[in-house]
Image (tube, rainbow, N blue to C red):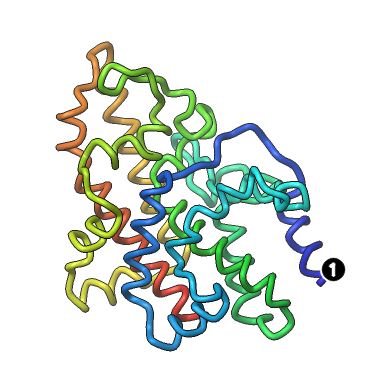
C-alpha cells in the first residue's frame, strides 16, 4: 500500500492555484449516466459491488467534492493538478512543458494501469478511490477549458459577460453553457444524446487518452479563436449557444462513451 501511495505522490507533489473544476456537477453526471448506460453486465456488476450498490453517477463529482473532506487532508490534495493539462497556443501536449505535479493524462494513465495490471495488489479502498477518479477525470479531459492555455490558467483569466454577469471562459464551459443551453436533467441529457448507432460507438472509443485529449485541445483552440475574433464586440449568449451546442453535446457524449469503454476494459 505504501508503494502505491508513494507512486501517487511522485506524480503530483505540490499544488498550484489553477482552478480544477470541469463541467460542473451536471456535466459530470451526464458523462457518468451515458457511461453507465453503455457498461457491460459484468462491468456493471463489479462496479456496483465496489460502490456498495451506488452508481457511478452518484460519485461523478467526488473528486471535486473531496476538497472539503478528510481525504483532502490525507494526501489527496496532491491530485489537484490531475484535472487538466494546460496547452498554450502553438503547442501540443507533446511539445508543452509538463506540469511536474502531474496532469489529467499522467493521472489517467497511472490509474488505469494500476486498475488493469496491479488490481490484485490494491486494497478495496484503493480500488474504490481509483474508480471514482477515473470516472471524474475522463469527464474532465473532454471539457475544452481543461485543455485551455497555461497563460490564462485554462480560461480563468479570460473574462467575459454571460447574460449580463461577469464570468470567465473557464466558468462558462464548466457549467454555465450547460445550464443555459437546456433545462434538462442529467438523465434527459443522456436520453437525448445517447441515440447514436453501434458503429459510431465503436469508432469513437478507438485510440488512447492522448488521442482523445488532442481533440479536446483543438476544441479549446476554436473557442479561443472565436473570442479573439469578436474583438471589442460583446459576446451574444444566444448566438454562442447556437454555435457551440454541437461541440458541447459531442464532448459530453464522447466523454460518456469513452468512460464506458475504459471501465469495460478494466472490469
Examine the rendered structure and indicate whether residue 9 appears above or below residue 169.
Answer: below
Specify the farthest residue to the bottom: 42
Give the side of residue 7 with respect to residue 219, left or right: right
Residue sitting at x 18%, y 69%: 196
Q: Position of residue 265 (x, y in %)?
A: 47, 81
Give the side of residue 239 with respect to residue 14, left or right: left
Q: Position of residue 75 (x, y in %)?
A: 76, 52
What residue is pinned by disc 1? 2
Examine the rendered structure and indicate whether residue 265 appears above or below residue 174.
Answer: below
Question: If the image is split into quadrants, where does the N terminus sit?
Answer: bottom right
The 10 Å Cα crowd at callout 1, few under 14, some 14 to 19, many 20 or more, is few
Residue toward you, 137 or 176: 176
Q: Quadrant of residue 32?
A: bottom left
Residue sitting at x 26%, y 61%: 190
Residue sitting at x 55%, y 41%: 20
Q: Position of residue 256 (x, y in %)?
A: 35, 64
Examine the rendered structure and indicate whether residue 116 appears above or below residue 166.
Answer: below
Residue sitting at x 57%, y 77%: 50
Specify the farthest residue to the right: 2
Tally of numbered discs: 1
- SS at mark 1 in the image: helix
Specify the farthest residue to the front: 53
Q: Position of residue 213 (x, y in %)?
A: 44, 55
Give the side of residue 84 with respect to residue 6, left or right: left
Amino acid at each position: 500500500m505504501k508503494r502505491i501511495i508513494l507512486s501517487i505522490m511522485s506524480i503530483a507533489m505540490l499544488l498550484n492555484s489553477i482552478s480544477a473544476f470541469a463541467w460542473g456537477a451536471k456535466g459530470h453526471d451526464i458523462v457518468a449516466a451515458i457511461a453507465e448506460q453503455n457498461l457491460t453486465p459484468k462491468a456493471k456488476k463489479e462496479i456496483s459491488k465496489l460502490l456498495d450498490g451506488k452508481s457511478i453517477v452518484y460519485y461523478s463529482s467526488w473528486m471535486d467534492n473531496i476538497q472539503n473532506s478528510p481525504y483532502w487532508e490525507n494526501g489527496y490534495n496532491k491530485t489537484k493538478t490531475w484535472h487538466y493539462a494546460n496547452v498554450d497556443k502553438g503547442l501540443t501536449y507533446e511539445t508543452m512543458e509538463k506540469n511536474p505535479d502531474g496532469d489529467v493524462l499522467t493521472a489517467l494513465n497511472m490509474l488505469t494501469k494500476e486498475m488493469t495490471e496491479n488490481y490484485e495488489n490494491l486494497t478495496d479502498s484503493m480500488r474504490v478511490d481509483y474508480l471514482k477518479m477515473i470516472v471524474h477525470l475522463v469527464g474532465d479531459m473532454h471539457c475544452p477549458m481543461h485543455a485551455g492555455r497555461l497563460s490564462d490558467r485554462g480560461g480563468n483569466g479570460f473574462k467575459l459577460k454571460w447574460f449580463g454577469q461577469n464570468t470567465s471562459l473557464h466558468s462558462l464551459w464548466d457549467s454555465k453553457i450547460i445550464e443555459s443551453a437546456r433545462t434538462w436533467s442529467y438523465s434527459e441529457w443522456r436520453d437525448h444524446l445517447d441515440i447514436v448507432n453501434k458503429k459510431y460507438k465503436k469508432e469513437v472509443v478507438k485510440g488512447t487518452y492522448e488521442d482523445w485529449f488532442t481533440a479536446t485541445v483543438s476544441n479549446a483552440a476554436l473557442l479561443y479563436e472565436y473570442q479573439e475574433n469578436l474583438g471589442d464586440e460583446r459576446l451574444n449568449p444566444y448566438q454562442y449557444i447556437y454555435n457551440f451546442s454541437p461541440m458541447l453535446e459531442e464532448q459530453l457524449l464522447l466523454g460518456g462513451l469513452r468512460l464506458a469503454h475504459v471501465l469495460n476494459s478494466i472490469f
